[in-house]
Image (cartoon, helix red, strand yellow):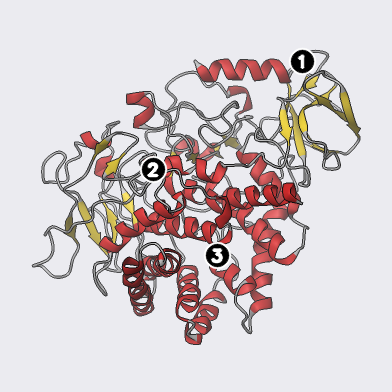
Amino acid sequence: MKKTIIISLIAGLVSCTSGYENSWIRINQLGYMPGSPKNAVMVSKEKVDVSEFSLCRAVDDQEVFRSEAVREFDEWGAFQKGFRLDFTQFTNEGEYYIKVKNVKSPVFRIDNDVYANTSDFILNYMRQQRCGYNTFYNSTCHQNDGFIIFHPDEEKDSTHIDVRGGWHDASDYLQYVTTSANAVYQMLFAYRENPSVFGDEFDAMGNSESNGIPDILDEAKWGLDWLDRMNPSYGEMYNQLADDRDHIGYKLPANDTADYGRGGGGERPVYFCTGEPQGSERYKNRATGIASTAGKYASAFALGSMLLEDFYPDFSAKIKAKATDAYKWGKLNPGVCQTAPHMAPYFYEEDNWVDDMELAAAQVFELTQSEDYLDEAIEYGIQEPVTPWMGADTARHYQWYPFLNLGHSLLAFKYENNAQNSFSEYFEEGIKRVHEKGAKNPFFIGIPFIWCSNNLVTAMATQCHIYRTATGDESYYEMEQSLIDWLFGCNPWGTSMIVGLPGNGDYPSDVHSAAVTLMGKQPVGGLVDGPIYGSIFGRLKGVHLSRGDVYEQFQSRLVVYHDDNADYSTNEPTMDGTASLSYILSSLEREGLEAENN
């Protein structure tokens, strides 16, 4: 009901008569900082003409700015026409709306504080995803985890290992090192770059009280504790806890009845990293090695050791040693260690691994200051100059993961080395490829609409921001901002892709989540998967809509998004995607604070 009412209200604001009744103006619902690029997008299901637009003050409907800075686009998605309305030169703070004839946008703000507290806000979802003690559910879950499978030592195989903790990956209760280690690193990286913006409102267990440690470090520590358990000794490395036998319908974590051969709600399997294909007899992954997982362990341990030293000195020393060990194990076992399927053919199809080892070597270099690691980071990095999805039209699910190469950013902009300029060029080349594709449509979106496309949007916005602030080159600033705008409502559906943000806006309210379905509680702060190609949606197993599509008029054969709990392909929040927002949101918050203070 909430979604239907919101859509009706927004439709009333943005549609009109006089031949423009099928036209809408999309904006960033959070708002715009005065000094940033500012564009709205008008789309129409008719072939309308737009040559100018107005900016009106919301409080009294007074026109305060008029412009002819309009770029026109032909058919794209569900729309016959699209227009970019550029009001970058208007910098006065306040509340406004865009107007084209009688078409009005929703009201938005221009202010330096529009991103304030957003980087802490998303941590609400990370706390909800915690396995074990969880304040969101006020319960404890999965205390029997787990039993080892695929271990080459028959005496150890099928025995118990304590791997409690960590995060549930999404709305199911599977847990992966692949995504968890990346989430840890992303949060640590965000804190290292922007420490001043993170608050301390929660303790280490997620209770609402300060503990003298920034909340983002509390969350990263929660993930590091689990990684520590999943890598108990040198060469003993695990990649996955549970599998898709979990997918038996909505259930709350403490009431998990999934049966892995040890009774409903019993121990769950823990997958040993063998470097070979794993799965059931019917479905298997295409694993070729261990380096992709080992590299992720190493980078998370290395940066975690550095940032947690003042708070947890003993733990910091422990994972410092594990960082170098994990990196060495990755060198000995090159190749990808993919997640394992069981009942269905779906898994994280990661096909690249040199990016993980590059970041690991670079981060271990920073930890140890041993030049050998820096040289090895360069050697790994030149093997994959550009993350392969960038500029591509499609890719398999999580095929090129993580979705950006932060190792490149360290070698290009942080550490002095003999290949620094080359890595800066590599970093820019990925941006160029996406920029070229994005410039062809009104939303400036050059991202392939594969499963979890919002993660790719976040990755490219992050890469653009790192490049711009490191080099001073603003050639891609408009695309950077457009990618952020896309996440907050400047998209065909006019909705934010982050649950609860902004609180007075239109955002996903019927997400694929047991919390929503069984408790009526929103997974606040979670980034949903996001739009996918209509062709992908049409062939996924078990995906349907549970009710009428509130966005029906905005869907197309090109791309669809549904705010519907039955659509796990576009409307399921993910833990790693949410964590990956940490850098870009904290960076924007810091920029706003610095602009305000200057």
N-terminal-most mark, 1 or 2:
1
x, y (%) of residue 50? 86, 29
Residue found at x 60% / y 29%: 555
Q: Nearer the viewer, mark 1 or mark 2?
A: 2
Q: Nearer the viewer, residue 357 or 118?
A: 118
Task: Check the image and report above or below for 463 versus 320.
Answer: above
x, y (%) of residue 14? 72, 20
N-terminal-most mark, 1 or 3:
1
Residue found at x 42% / y 35%: 568
Q: Badge 1: how crowded within 10 Å, few (<14), some, or many (20+)?
A: some
Residue found at x 45% / y 65%: 307
Label 1 sits on residue? 16
What kind of element bears circle 2?
A: helix
What kind of element bears circle 3?
A: helix
Q: Nearer the viewer, residue 524 or 117?
A: 117
Q: How many marks?
A: 3
* 455 lies left or right of 143: right
